[in-house]
Image: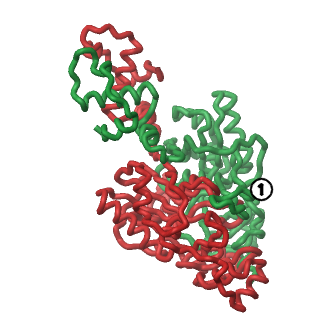
Chain colours: A green, B red
């Protein structure tokens, strides 16, 4: 019965006679079931929180849910679609939505066949062994193109480093491509305001995308927009465990959350473009934000500057 | 009473007379308390899983716990230290340990004052405005140095891109520096085997570090070693929602988990170097792994090659 001895030690109570339900002779382990029941139900405690009460060693705890939504290709209302899951959101939940799902909801989908290819796109496509029409689309959508490797152009889009300007041909019918969301911060704010106005729910929103990290195999998540909380915690000037002043430490909370989202969203047939994080503490921020709250100019970055400094 | 009507609908059961505890007349809401007790205790369901039963829209779900451990500076047994938290691990839990905590446990701590500075370190320190002794240490520890920006050298260490060769002066008494773990995959395997041999618990282990991503503000997590599961899921050749074959998609599961860990671990005074992820599905892998399971040679990477291709 889940270590009655430990529970007994924890509460250090001799069993009062009242737990014996009048004169009905309960055996010892049955009494402990009853105490467990009383604790769990009337204090509203789950197994886990009993554990943490017992031990007081769990400093913090959060939960993550992946919501299944039907695949879409036509524009739709993002808020309504999420509501239709009937998931019971709670105050301070963090809603992570895949950027592709946001793009599709806003109709940022292009039929590739219909694109006319420029001379520049032909040259670039040849150089990097890419599809000409996709290359044309990338050149049109990118704010800047830094270079490429076979199959990919490394671009800047909305202030962020972004392979192929965020254009993606997977999880959309053949012959179509999904663009980067047009104004991701506005989309995040709109979703958040819908929850506040219609459900009186103060949620936080992250729009997530997946990216390669330098030198790594496989993609992790980055936040391309947030609403309602500070995406980066600046620890500079704080003290560490030994009283040293922390110098350069900023924590990319929104990217961490996006990684949680991307880890559950999958890339293939899972169809779980919305992930909810519950119990993770963020710092509220009501101000309207933009890409500079998440990113630095790519050319001021340690990786790129290091390779240029040789 | 947490919506008895919905619970009633869920289980669609008329109240049997036996729930009335013999002839003792329980009021309606008390009966529902009792049913709740029975459901929660004997079926082991938490509030959340009741929700998901009701709705069947949550595709997957996991929980994350941050464990508080006392700060250390002397070598210690990592497994014993984690056991001392008395956290109740379950089968298939994923244990994420900060690389710094691993390093300290293995005595990879250096007194900076005692380092003799070479001529090369002096020149490099001046060029990148760094402390001479730290520079010397970085040059000794790095497998390769690619370049730098003021305050940092971008190095390769154990096959991975690593600012300052992973050497860190925070969360350790002034005058000391923590090195990168000597053999992180061995450390991860050892921790996992300890749990198997001593507790019959098949856990998975990630050793996490924090890194900047190109162009981003703030750090997220990367896995510098794993034990027991495939760190990268290769989706190439699988089909997406519309039957397109996925071409280049590999998912860095271990990096995603490390990001979850780093998001909770904090950087300052939190002292939570161990994070447990419960309920997240990984692909088991018993083979001994190395850095090539997590990383590619930095010079084959899209970012670095793109900037060189200009």
Q: Between A235 and A255, which is closer to the camera in this rendering?
A: A235
Q: Is residue A141 left or right of residue B79?
A: right
The reply to whether residue B4 is in sight is yes
Q: Between A61 and A43, which is closer to the camera in this rendering?
A: A43
Please tell me in which quadrant of the rendered image residue B22 appears. Answer: top left
Q: Is residue B275 left or right of residue A2?
A: right
Please tell me in which quadrant of the rendered image residue B152 appears. Answer: bottom right
Residue A298 percent location from the top left of the image: 75, 67
Residue B266 percent location from the top left of the image: 61, 55
Q: Chain of mark 1?
A: A
> Would you place residue A286 above or below residue B38 in this image?
below
Quadrant position of the C terminus of chain A in the picture: bottom right
Quadrant position of the N terminus of chain A in the picture: top left
Q: Which residue is mark 1?
A: A292
Q: How many marks?
A: 1
Q: In percent of the image, x 75 and y 80: which residue is there?
A: A308
Q: In percent of the image, x 40 and y 29: which residue is there?
A: A39
In what element is the residue under mark 1?
A: helix
Q: Is residue B89 left or right of residue B98?
A: left
Q: In percent of the image, x 60 and y 46: which residue is there?
A: A97
The reply to whether residue B249 is in sight is no
Q: In percent of the image, x 71 and y 90: which residue is there?
A: B120
The crowding category of the residue bearing disc 1, from other C-alpha atoms within 10 Å (few below 14, some 14 to 19, many at least 20), is: few
Residue A70 percent location from the top left of the image: 51, 42
Q: Which residue, as the protein is rendered here, is positioned at the far bottom?
A: B119
Residue A183 percent location from the top left of the image: 74, 49
Q: Between A34 and A10, which is closer to the camera in this rendering?
A: A10
């Amino acid at each position: 019965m889940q270590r009655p001895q430990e529970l007994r030690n924890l509460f250090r109570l001799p069993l009062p006679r009242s737990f014996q339900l009048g004169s009905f002779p309960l055996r010892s382990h049955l009494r402990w079931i009853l105490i467990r029941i009383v604790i769990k139900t009337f204090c509203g405690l789950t197994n886990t929180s009993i554990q943490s009460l017992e031990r007081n060693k769990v400093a913090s705890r959060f939960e993550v849910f992946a919501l299944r939504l039907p695949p879409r290709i036509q524009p739709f209302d993002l808020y309504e679609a999420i509501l239709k899951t009937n998931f019971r959101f709670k105050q301070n939940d963090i809603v992570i939505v895949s950027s592709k799902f946001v793009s599709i909801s806003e109709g940022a989908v292009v039929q590739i066949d219909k694109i006319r290819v420029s001379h520049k796109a032909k040259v670039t496509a040849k150089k990097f062994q890419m599809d000409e029409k996709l290359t044309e689309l990338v050149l049109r959508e990118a704010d800047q193109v830094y270079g490429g490797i076979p199959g990919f152009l490394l671009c800047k889009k909305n202030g962020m480093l972004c392979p192929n300007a965020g254009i993606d041909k997977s999880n959309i019918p053949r012959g179509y491509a999904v663009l980067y969301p047009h104004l991701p911060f506005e989309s995040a704010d709109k979703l958040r305001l819908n929850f506040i106005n219609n459900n009186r729910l103060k949620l936080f929103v992250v729009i997530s995308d997946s990216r390669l990290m330098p030198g790594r195999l496989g993609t992790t998540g980055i936040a391309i927009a947030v609403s309602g909380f500070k995406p980066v915690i600046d620890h500079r000037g704080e003290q560490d465990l030994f009283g040293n002043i922390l110098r350069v430490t900023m924590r990319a909370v929104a990217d961490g959350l996006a990684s949680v989202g991307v880890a559950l969203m999958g890339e293939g047939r899972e169809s779980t473009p919305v992930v909810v994080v519950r119990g993770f503490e963020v710092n509220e921020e009501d101000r309207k934000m933009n890409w500079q709250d998440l990113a630095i100019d790519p050319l001021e970055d340690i990786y790129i500057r290091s390779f240029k400094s040789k």
